[in-house]
Image: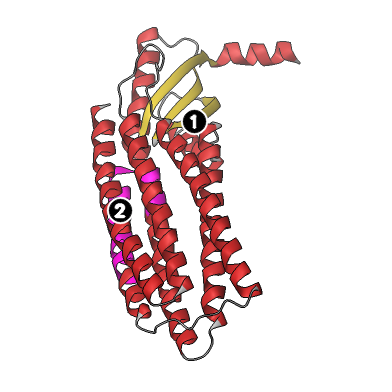
Amino acid sequence: MNNQIQRVKIAEQGAKISISVYLILALSKFTAGFFMDSSSLSADGLNNLTDVLSSVTVLLGLRTARKPADKNHPYGHWKAEPIASLITSFIMLFVGFQIFQNSILRLLQNELVEPNKFASVVALFSSLVLFILYRYNLNLAKKVKSDGLKAVARDNLADSLTSSATAVTIIGSSIGWVWLDNIMAAIVAVIIVKTGIDVFRESTFSLSDGFKDKHLHSYKTRILTLDKVEKVSSIKARMYGANTYVDVTILVDGKMTVQESHDITERIEKLLYEEFDVMHTDVHVEPDNLMGQFNREQM
């Protein structure tokens, strides 16, 4: 448990750095977009502002997640992380729809202003900074195995690409394609909405105890390689934040002693923890002959 808490604390570092970087970039883009008449750069600044809110929400979720278990939360507070991600998705969807609506209205009302080409320098610099932040958070997420921080890293990469596209758009608008600036603002809005939908799906999947079959297959295959495990009759898993909980029922020789059965459960728990980073495993042992008798009675 201490190891898991330490991982969460390390993941918090990535969230804190993201907050600082996004806040600086958002203010810079807002200012540059206003004085240099670039709608796409202002939209990109709004995009980064949602990332500030997202990173703050993730940070609060991580801090809540590492709170110890209590009488009302016997399994701990690990689900605070996907709840934070769910709140983040709502923020992103709201801001994305607002930017899209405003950019389309400007196009329909022919409110086209040629942006200053030097605004592209701000966008290019932002793209470079965000790519460096993406690499940092991705490496940190892999190190501490944090899905929340991995989602932040993915968002960093999307924002880096968006800033690059914004720079190209500003240059195009400054040479006569004025409409391109508002078009890019709308595209940025679509990217924000798409990312929000992805975050919503992932967080609701986790909160509804969804779990990918391919991981269960890997666990089952590895458990069957252990000596004296004759069959895995059932295996289930769920996520509590970034922590995996597994429930597995194995069949063994009915003549096995209680001590031998206990030893097998210990080996399975150790195996899943060391090879798959499963935080908690509940192993139920059944005699193979009893299960066969049960199946025959059912028939």
Q: Is residue 236 magenta?
A: no
Which quadrant of the figure has residue 136?
A: bottom left
Across and down, in percent, residue 80 comes to 41, 32
Image depth: mark 2 or mark 1 in front: 2
Residue 238: mark in rendering: 1
For the residue marked with disc 2, what is the amino acid? Answer: Ser
Residue 17: mark in rendering: none
Asked if residue 112 shows in the view, the reply is yes
For the residue marked with disc 1, what is the amino acid? Answer: Arg
**Could you say whether the residue bearing mark 2 is in a helix, strand or loop?**
helix
Looking at the rendered image, the quarter that the N terminus falls into is top left
**Is disc 2 surrounded by few (<14), some (14 to 19) or many (20+) residues within 10 Å?**
many
Which quadrant of the figure has residue 130?
A: bottom left
The residue stretch that appears in magenta:
127-152
**Could you say whether the residue bearing mark 1 is in a helix, strand or loop?**
strand
Q: Is residue 135 magenta?
A: yes
Left or right: residue 109 versus residue 128 is: right
Give the residue drawn at x 38%, y 59%. 156
Across and down, in percent, residue 57 comes to 38, 41
Give the residue drawn at x 29%, y 43%. 144
Asked if residue 146 shows in the view, the reply is no
Looking at the rendered image, the quarter that the C terminus falls into is top right
Give the residue drawn at x 49%, y 34%. 220
Is the stretch drawn in magenta largely helix, strand or loop? helix
Across and down, in percent, residue 275 comes to 34, 38
Residue that label 2 marks? 18
